[in-house]
Amino acid sequence: MKKLAIKLNFWAKSTALILGISAMSACSGFLEEDVVSQIGNDYLSTAKGLNDGVNAAYSTMRAWYGTERGNNFTIFGTDTYTNGADGSWKFMNFYTNQFDSQNGHVRELWDEFYRGINTCNAVIDRSADATGVSEEVLLQRISEAKFIRAHHYFIMVQLFGGVDLQLSETSTPTKEVTRASVPAIYAAIIQDLEEAIPNLEAKAQSSNYGRATRPAAEHLLGRVYLTKATSEAGEASDYGKAETLFQSVIDNYGFSLLPDFGDVHAFGNEINNEVIWSTQYTYDPLTTGGGNNAHVFFLMEYDVQPGMIRDTENGRPFKRFRPTDYTLNVIFADRENDSRYFKSYRDVFLSNRPGTYNTTFDKSKETLTFAAGDTTMWLPGYNMPESERAKYPYQVLTPELYTERLFPALRKHMDPGRADRTQFAGGRDYIAFRLADTYLMLAEAQFRQNKISQATENINVVRRRAAFPGKEAEMEISESDLTFEFITEERERELIGEQSRWLDLKRWGILVERVKLYNPQGAPNIQDFHVLRPIPQNQIDRAEGNASAFPQNPGY
């Protein structure tokens, strides 16, 4: 079953268009690409053009999920991850003045999301003239465009606050832009999703895999309400509306938690009963854009250690994101009952370069000899005396020996399917929405409404699945255990490394507090204004009136 995806983006013009867009393959059930160029202005009004335009809009999801920028925006500068040894983006973790309006990440995300938004606007506006397409399919494609548009504005309002709210096609260049209010943006997002939900496929997975479905839109809208509740647009009814939507996703579509937490992100299992919606990638360099790059960022420097050499199985270690002490000692304090630490982090490395070597970090022995497949390193997760480490015929990496190069490596995104050990553009789908997250957000919405019994049970659904076999009862919490602090920690035990933490801390109003407490590299510089990212300078410069018409966020 061949899976391709969208390569380039659609940008509406009043003249001929040049696109790299995708068509749906009826035989494979996946979003697949046909490259189309030099098309006429009326192409979007055809059945194929409508379809291709929507599929092109999906490609702009790749500006966020699995990318360096998406991870830097959401992993760096939090309480659970700080910087490793390498990379030029450490200032996003340090919160220094290098993170300014000239930042490449904000410019790229801004431009790419607005391309996607304008593509959606073009699809919606021109759908009135569409021919050769059934009303059912027409409404579905329009609803997919509204899902994508709502998604993009939701990410942007969280990162930037008020942005330019464009809900109709821009067919010619314009400098007339303004910053809409946060309440106005949330109102547009909610309207898009409420209008989209009835016309999307009401099942767990679309018949053409990769398209938005009704449960995906309900999950997204639930998160919108949960986030809106603590924003300047918040209303008393937000938590109740979020609860209803999350409950619907759980009850009505046949999703189920996988029995083993470790299988959720297992390579080759990206399509499973827990996945509500994902962003598609492929190993074809012609169609995958920059690829899913998440596989490189969370890995330690294993490849220069005795008995080891870089390979596709162990990954290409960029050493960008290093778990904080808070992550290792508090979030994952329970490793007797809870399997998620050992199933999230790599604790053993097997030799792929046999021979005899001098030891590097573990000086409890001078030399070691490895055959192929022998253990070369073990990360037990706790300290031990040097005399105990000396008993093992391999290096033992204990917490006291962790550095910016040597630390527990996250397994979730590893991609052994790459063509070679240097390939940066991974091909795994990026799981964006999954059922465990739905349960946790449902519990949070219920907790905020003082529905402690229901919230506790929904937390326990996730925790029982995470238990080592036979430890399910020990993993359950009581109502008295359920606090806001517990919710913040449980989300990260389940979702660490899945592009949610910065956004969670921001919506909870505790970003600055938590970075100061738990991220030593970010603590000295983070200030209250850092709850928003800088508006890209090129956007301000191209606005009529410049900063007076499109002002920068405070502090930048």
Image (cartoon, helix red, strand yellow):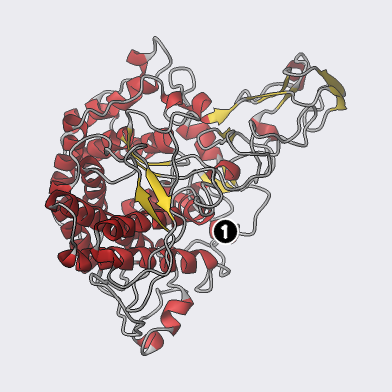
Check disc 1 and give the amino acid type. Answer: Phe
Quarter the N terminus occupies: top left
> Is residue 199 rendered to the left or right of residue 109?
left
> Is residue 186 rendered to the left or right of residue 403?
left
Q: Position of residue 296 (x, y in %)?
A: 60, 43
Q: Nearer the viewer, residue 457 or 16?
A: 16
- Residue at the image position 52 percent from the left and 42 percent from the top: 427
Q: Residues within 10 Å of mark 1 (few under 14, many from 20)?
A: many
Q: Residue furthest top?
A: 470
Q: Residue furthest bottom?
A: 545
Q: Position of residue 416 (x, y in %)?
A: 59, 33
- Residue at the image position 54 percent from the left and 46 percent from the top: 284
Q: Which residue is mark 1?
A: 94
Whether residue 339 is visible to the viewer of this picture, yes or no, is yes
Whether residue 228 is visible to the viewer of this picture, yes or no, is no
Q: Position of residue 302 (x, y in %)?
A: 71, 34
Helix, strand or loop at mark 1: helix
Q: Position of residue 107 (x, y in %)?
A: 48, 69
> Is residue 329 rendered to the left or right of residue 502?
right
